């Protein structure tokens, strides 16, 4: 195996090129002049090149020496950058984070987060990508994503989960439905209702199916929605009712729909858990700080009004 120059040897050579004097370079590096001369000689022997013209007066680099110094300077600069980055990562958020999120969460939560995140951590580059729920965990484990924002439970021996908050699910009804006259509903009101739901790839499907089984609701077997928008449109056509996340409902129904209304469950009794998940071997401090920013954004924007989120 070819022996490589050490970082110290490169630092000594760069110091010598800057001071152009063995004694001054040795003083700058905190070693004796003979030790510096020995290290430079060892570097020349290792590379098989003469780097320095030795003689009286200022030190002169050979043409080969100038080329080596230029590259050594770039290497040392990059190493210092790595150390600076490491320090920044230990104390804050910087660099690049690839965040994957399900289509039922990210578009309605992240707008509250990104402004606050950029203000607090301006050096952070956050790439946000919507991913089908069935693929989120696999892409995280494969390293395509650094962290995922998803409905819980989600996890495993190789993953760390940080629950952020519980989000109420609201009952979406056609405007002319009998339950629309009530200010709030209960789980018992699901009895005999035709309930539209996302497909089994979504965690919400299993949750809603269990709720219907417990309280007598009827999951529509002839329709499995591919998006929350599609389900909302089916509700507006009178094809059934749906349980929609509070973030989606407040973003899309209040301002854009005239034929669908939503009603909260009494005491926000029907909720889903939202959290961040990352690989256990990753830098936990980074994602815990990201969790704090998301919670603070949620507290400031989503914990007021009817059916507020529930912070854990």
Image (cartoon, rainbow, N blue to C red):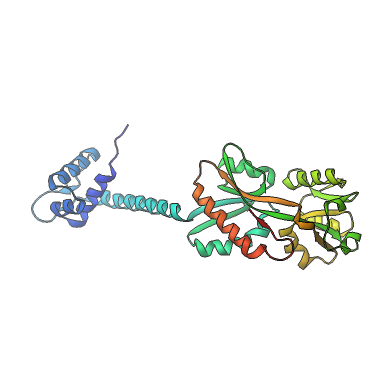
Q: Locate residue 138: give its quadrant.
A: top right
Q: How many marks?
A: 0
Please provide percent x and percent y for residue 204: 74, 48
Asked if residue 202 shows in the view, the reply is no
Q: Is residue 183 left or right of residue 131?
A: right
Residue positioned 14% across, 51% down in the render: 22
Quadrant housing residue 136: top right
Q: Residue furthest front?
A: 267
Residue sitting nearer the eye, 87 or 60? 87
* Location of residue 176 with respect to 72 vertically, above or below: below
In this rendering, the answer to whether 36 lies above or below 175 is above
Seen from this angle, which residue lies furthest left? 56
For the N terminus, the quadrant is: top left
Q: Closer to the camera, 43 or 268?
A: 268
Q: Is residue 302 among the parts visible in the rendering?
A: yes
The answer to whether residue 221 is left or right of residue 94 is right
Asked where in the image residue 34 lies, by quadrant, the reply is top left
Image point (19%, 44%), residue name: 40
Q: Residue furthest top?
A: 1
Picture coordinates of residue 89 (x, y %)?
45, 52
User: On the rendered structure, is 206 left or right of 91?
Assistant: right
- In the displayed structure image, the side of residue 92 where residue 69 appears, left or right: left
* Residue at x 81% of width, y 65% of height: 257
Q: Position of residue 169 (x, y in %)?
A: 76, 55
Front-most of residues 109 and 49: 109
Relative image position of residue 91 (x, y in whole percent): 44, 55
At x 59%, y 57%, the residue is 294
């Amino acid at each position: 195996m070819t022996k490589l120059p050490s970082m110290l040897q490169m630092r000594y050579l760069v110091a010598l090129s800057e001071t152009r004097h063995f004694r001054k370079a040795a003083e700058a590096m905190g070693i004796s002049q003979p030790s510096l001369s020995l290290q430079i000689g060892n570097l020349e022997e290792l590379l098989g090149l003469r780097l320095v013209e030795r003689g009286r007066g200022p030190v002169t680099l050979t043409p080969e020496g100038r080329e080596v110094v230029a590259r050594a300077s770039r290497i040392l600069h990059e190493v210092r950058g790595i150390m600076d980055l490491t320090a920044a990562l230990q104390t804050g958020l910087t660099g690049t984070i690839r965040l994957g999120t399900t289509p039922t969460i990210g578009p309605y939560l992240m707008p509250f987060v990104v402004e606050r995140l950029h203000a607090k951590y301006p050096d952070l580059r956050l790439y946000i990508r919507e991913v089908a729920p069935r693929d989120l965990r696999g892409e995280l484990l494969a390293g395509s994503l650094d962290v995922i924002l998803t409905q819980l439970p989600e996890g495993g021996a190789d993953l760390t989960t940080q629950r952020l908050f519980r989000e109420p699910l609201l009952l979406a009804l056609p405007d002319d439905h009998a339950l629309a006259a009530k200010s709030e509903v209960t789980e018992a009101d699901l009895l005999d209702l035709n309930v539209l739901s996302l497909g089994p790839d979504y965690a919400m499907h299993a949750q809603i199916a269990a709720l219907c089984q417990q309280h007598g609701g009827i999951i529509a077997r002839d329709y499995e929605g591919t998006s929350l928008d599609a389900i909302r449109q089916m509700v507006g056509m009178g094809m059934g009712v749906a349980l929609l996340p509070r973030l989606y409902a407040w973003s899309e129904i209040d301002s854009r729909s005239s034929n669908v209304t939503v009603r909260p469950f009494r005491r926000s009794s029907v909720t889903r858990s939202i959290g961040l998940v990352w690989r256990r071997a990753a830098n936990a401090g980074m994602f815990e700080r990201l969790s704090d920013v998301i919670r603070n954004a949620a507290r400031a924007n989503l914990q007021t009004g009817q059916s507020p989120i529930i912070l854990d």
